[in-house]
Amino acid sequence: MAGSAGMMEVYTIIEKEGFDKSFWIKVGACFTNRDGSLNVFLDALPVNGRLHIRSRQKQGAERENA
């Protein structure tokens, strides 16, 4: 993948008691290399040890919570 098509966003998803929806916290970025491998750059570490990597959304696009 070339350009921004190879760029993804890294989130941790937090479930909190008393809240109907989960909280999505962006913790970094991920890039696809020419050989298909991934480079992950984290700005923070999730305390729950879980990462969710997904394709980058267009700016202003609404994200659906999974």
Image (cartoon, rainbow, N blue to C red):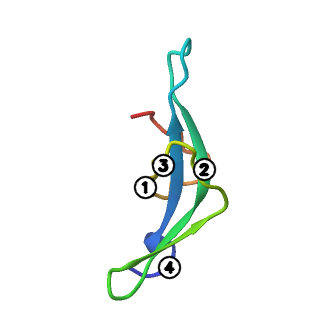
Q: Say what amino acid the circle numbered 2 marks.
A: Lys
Mark on residue 54? 1
Tell me which amino acid carries mark 1.
Answer: Arg
The quarter of the picture where the C terminus appears is top left
On-image quarter of the N terminus? bottom left
Location of residue 35 with respect to 20 vertically, above or below: below
Q: Residue furthest top?
A: 18
Q: CA distance from mark 3 to mark 2?
A: 14 Å
| Residue drawn at the location 54% of the way across and 54% of the way down | 58
Residue on which disc 2 sits: 26
Give the Cα distance between marks 1 and 3: 17 Å
Between label 1 and label 3, give the one nearer the viewer: 3
Please tell me which of labels 4 and 1 falls first in the chain.
Answer: 4
Circles 3 and 4, Cβ within 8 Å, touching? The answer is no
Name which of mark 2 and mark 1 comes first in the sequence: 2
10 sits to left or right of 35: right
Between marks 3 and 2 in the image, the one whose residue lies nearer the viewer: 3
The tag earlier along the polypeptide, 1 or 3, is 3
Residue under circle 4? Answer: 3
